[in-house]
Image (tube, helix red, strand yellow):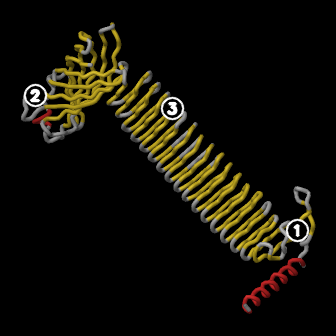
Amino acid sequence: MKTFVKVTVCIFLFVAGLNSWANSFPGNNVSIFNQSGDSTGHRAFQISLVPYFGTNGISDSIVNDISINILAGYVYEVRSLEIGGMFNIVKRNMQSCQLAGMGNVVFGKASGLQAAGIVNISNSLDGVQIAGMLNTVRHLKGIQISGLVNHTLTGCGIQMASLINNACDSSEFQISGFINNAALAKQFQISGMLNNVRETEFQIAGLVNNARMARQFQISGLLNNTSSPTNMQIAGLVNNASDIKSTQISGFVNNANTVNGLQAAGFLNRARNLKGVQIGFINIADSCSGVPIGILNFVKNGYHKLELSSDEMFYTNIAYRSGIQKIHGIVSAGIRPDNFDKPLWTYGVGVGTSFNLSPKMLFDMDIMFQNVIKSHEIADNFLYKIYAGADWQLFPKASLFFGVSYNFLVTDTRDEHYSTHYADIAPYTFTDHTYRRFNLKTWAGFRAGIRLF
């Protein structure tokens, strides 16, 4: 009990001494008027141990140029500098600089720097907030830097957090190691994992972007998602959108309800209603008034035909044509079955187009690229074919076709099997020339067969 009394007396004498010392400075105890017309006092500086226990006494209507809070302080306003061992609390505005070991709270406007070990809170900020965990402000014009979370209702500046940035009417820049969220992000959002925004001009994420309405770019290493019209989606893996009015580009998969622009994916494009262009290995659309360009194109009411044919080089061929009549993809395989021990066979891809000559007759044009293999010896031997012909629909689900082709066979003369396997596989030649290591042979041929659909 005696120790407590001694400590209390020492603290009281210490504060009384500080108060006397502070009052001796010019500019202290000067009355001024705040914006409401109420009279407040002014001090060049104040020192407090805890709120209401310092040189300002119990008054919270003192404007201070410099405020020093050993543990915590509560002042009316700060104009130059405030330093607190734990917390600084300002009833109205703070200007220039506010530093605290744990937290800063400004109920009015903070203009300058707020830095705290844990949390910074202010009604509005025109400057910089730096906190170890959390920054929160209602109106931001400046920079928020936090180890964990930044939050603002209206933002115009930069938010940086290792975990979460949140803004309602967002910012010119948001950078986060985990999540960015904004109701309206008019410029950048950059996140290591997730960006989420109601409407945006730019989003960049290492993993996921999600926007209710992305009017400009979305760029993601893995997934972009938007449920309303977007101008641009770019993802390393997956794009998903309700309606695309400009561009979807993905390294793997694009998905959209309606595409009125470009869908380009390394593997799969899917759209319910295609009004633009799809470019990918596989393209899928329920309805199509645009153009799918790919190896496999599946349009619900499109052009699908299974083809069995023969030509002058490969007597037995099978191919599948898919897409729309004016442009469709082709995958094919063929074999020359005269030597089953060491057969000559081929596989390839191509693109074709067909035009109506009459209700039951089409004119076809194809370009094919095929790899030619003898036995199991795969080498750089390629066959290019340009084909033109006619297709007659003789039955409801079948047609006969016949046409002519011009062929270009490129073989590798340095291959160890060239002389025994590939030198004489052409049926005959119009030209036969060797350019450095490759031999080029050309000739005219034919193709005839039946198509089922």
In the image as oriented, which residue stretches furthest toward the top? 358
Instruction: Give the residue type that dot 3 points to.
Output: Asp
In the drawing, what numbered circle is on residue 243?
3
Determine the secondary structure under disc 2: loop
Distance (Cα) linking label 1 and label 2? 103 Å
Quadrant location, the N terminus: bottom right
Residue 205 position in % (x across, y down): 50, 49
Distance (Cα) linking label 1 and label 3? 61 Å
Q: Residues within 10 Å of mark 1 (few under 14, many from 20)?
A: many
In the image as oriented, which residue stretches furthest toward the bottom? 2
Q: Residues within 10 Å of mark 3 (few under 14, many from 20)?
A: many
In the drawing, what numbered circle is on residue 168?
none
Q: Is residue 43 above or below residue 211?
A: below
First in sequence: mark 1 vs mark 2: 1
Instruction: Give the residue type that dot 2 points to.
Output: Pro
First in sequence: mark 3 vs mark 2: 3
Instruction: Give the residue type that dot 1 points to.
Output: His
Left or right: 247 with respect to 283? right
Determine which residue is flagged by label 1. 42
Residue 300 position in % (x across, y down): 36, 24
Residue 311 position in % (x across, y down): 18, 21
In the image as oriented, which residue stretches furthest toward the front? 1
Quadrant location, the C terminus: top left
Left or right: 258 with respect to 108? left
- Residue sitting nearer the eye, 342 or 333: 333
Determine the secondary structure under disc 1: strand
Residue under the point 42% across and 30% down? 278
Determine which residue is flagged by label 2. 337
Rendering quarter of residue 284: top left
